[in-house]
């Protein structure tokens, strides 16, 4: 499936097209019958949850009631089975605010949040206190440091610029849809390498 807004020279083309061929992403239908992906746009938590569930073929939880989440009534119907699937799989835990859990489905995802979900999805063993090999390692939140270190050392989180260990993790920046495609693609590549 070709997306009209992903050019042949786009830096994430290989990953976006690969996920489209696998049926993991399908983009946005346009009135003229074409599809766009909006690679430089941000991605929401619900959209990322759907990508992870689709990539890993996690069975959807259509009967999940979401009672544990204070904002469940704000989660779109299409997203609920995906959220339920990833909650059941231990990949999504919600955001704790004032003692209550929130899905925050429509919120933008930061690069460190995206990374934490990807590492949980892989079930990877993270090493506590491993160094974050990035020039801006000090910017990584304490709760995400081990996951970000694991992802960078295994090529699951791309650097925004430079080469390891001098690139930038930019952990607090909103993840783009292109970056999400790369992370999901690398997640699948890692799983395939482990299966060999």
Image (cartoon, grey):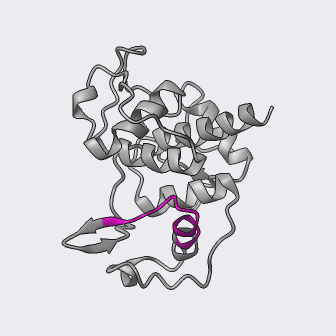
Toward which corner of the image does residue 30 lie, by quadrant? bottom right
Q: Nearer the viewer, residue 87 or 26?
A: 87
The answer to whether residue 164 is above or below residue 145 is above
Q: Nearer the viewer, residue 105 or 153?
A: 153
Q: Position of residue 196 (x, y in %)?
A: 81, 31
The answer to whether residue 193 shows anywhere in this view is yes
Span highlighted in magenta in the image: 84-95
The answer to whether residue 155 is above or below residue 67 is above
Residue at screen point 34% across, 14% down: 166
Q: Position of residue 157 (x, y in %)?
A: 47, 33
Residue at screen point 33% across, 61% down: 107
Residue at screen point 62% across, 76% down: 61
Relative to 61, 116 lies left or right: left
Toward which corner of the image does residue 138 lie, by quadrant? top left
Q: Residue furthest right?
A: 196
Residue at screen point 40% across, 47% down: 41
The answer to whether residue 41 is above or below residue 170 is below
The answer to whether residue 29 shows anywhere in this view is no
The answer to whether residue 116 is above or below residue 91 is above
Q: Residue furthest left?
A: 98
Q: Nearer the viewer, residue 10 or 195?
A: 195
Q: Position of residue 163 (x, y in %)?
A: 42, 14
Is residue 87 on the magenta stretch?
yes
Q: Position of residue 34 (x, y in %)?
A: 62, 53
Relative to 35, 152 lies left or right: left
């Amino acid at each position: 499936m070709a997306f009209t807004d992903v050019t042949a020279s786009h830096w994430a083309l290989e990953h976006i097209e690969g996920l489209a061929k696998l049926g993991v992403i399908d983009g946005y239908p346009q009135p003229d019958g074409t599809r766009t992906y909006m690679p430089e746009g941000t991605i929401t938590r619900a959209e990322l949850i759907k990508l992870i569930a689709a990539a890993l073929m996690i069975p959807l939880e259509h009967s999940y009631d979401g009672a544990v989440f204070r904002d469940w009534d704000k989660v779109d119907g299409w997203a609920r089975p995906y959220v339920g699937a990833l909650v059941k799989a231990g990949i999504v835990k919600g955001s704790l605010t004032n003692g209550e859990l929130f899905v925050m489905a429509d919120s933008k995802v930061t690069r460190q949040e995206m990374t934490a979900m990807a590492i949980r999805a892989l079930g990877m063993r993270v090493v506590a206190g491993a160094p974050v090999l990035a020039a801006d390692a000090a910017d990584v939140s304490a709760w995400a440091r081990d996951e970000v270190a694991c992802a960078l050392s295994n090529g699951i989180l791309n650097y925004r610029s430079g080469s390891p260990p001098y690139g930038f993790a930019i952990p607090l920046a909103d993840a783009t849809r292109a970056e999400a495609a790369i992370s999901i693609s690398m997640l699948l590549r890692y799983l395939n390498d482990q299966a060999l």
